[in-house]
Amino acid sequence: MESMYLGLLRICVRRGLNLAVRDVHKGSSDPYVVITLGKQKLKTHRVENNLNPEWNEELTLCIEDPCIPVKLEVYDYDTLTFDDNMGEAEIDIQPLIENVRMEQENFADGTIIKKILPCRENYLVEESCVVFKDNKVVQDMCLRLKNVESGEIEIQLQWIDLPGSKGV
């Protein structure tokens, strides 16, 4: 039976940089990341009292439509009240998926397949490269959080084909 999914997207949420203070009395925050795509919603563990947290946590989404951006939100955990928003970004997975389709047999390990430059239409802090590494297509990116005074999130995307999937 053919899967309705194109494949899986593994997102390694590496770390946050210069995140916003939401616990003013502590001068810090207890951040965690929520990744949303359609009805799929995944989140990292929280890191207490840290504006530069390291999560190094892998979250995996099933992808049906590569045109739908993945939403990333950062929150400050609060015990007695609603968690505070610490910014958001969208992850454009199309450059990664477009390059998974390419014939990869001729690529040497570490080959840069595509470079994506930061612009008004994306959330990139700096150039992001789609790379052939360890027989996989991966993309490292640093995203600038919007709707917040400061903060960036470093992530890595990796495509995983499903047996019997439609493929990309």
Image: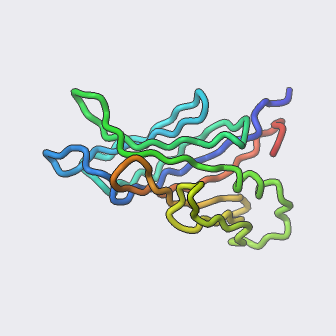
Identify the residue shown where x is 65% and y is 45%. Answer: 9
Q: Is residue 33 left or right of residue 59?
A: left
Where in the figure is residue 16, as x and y percent of width and height? 39, 55
Q: Nearer the viewer, residue 147 or 30?
A: 147
Identify the residue shown where x is 50% and y is 56%. Answer: 143
Q: Is residue 135 left or right of residue 33?
A: right
How was this image coloured? rainbow
User: Which quarter shows the C terminus?
Assistant: top right
Identify the residue shown where x is 70% and y is 71%. Answer: 112
Where in the figure is residue 51, as x and y percent of width and height? 30, 54
Q: Quadrant of residue 69?
A: top right
Q: Is residue 69 left or right of residue 111?
A: left
Where in the figure is residue 155, as x and y percent of width and height? 52, 55
Q: Is residue 78 above or below residue 32?
A: above
Where in the figure is residue 38, as x and y percent of width and height? 61, 30
Q: Is residue 156 left or right of residue 168?
A: left
User: Which quarter shows the N terminus?
Assistant: top right
Query: How many numbered tags mark residues here?
Result: 0
Q: Nearer the viewer, residue 155 or 91?
A: 91
Q: Nearer the viewer, residue 155 or 147?
A: 147
- Taking the view exactly as shown, the residue that stands out farthest to the front is 120
Identify the residue shown where x is 75% and y is 34%. Answer: 5
Q: Quadrant of residue 39?
A: top right
Q: Is residue 105 above or below residue 157?
A: below
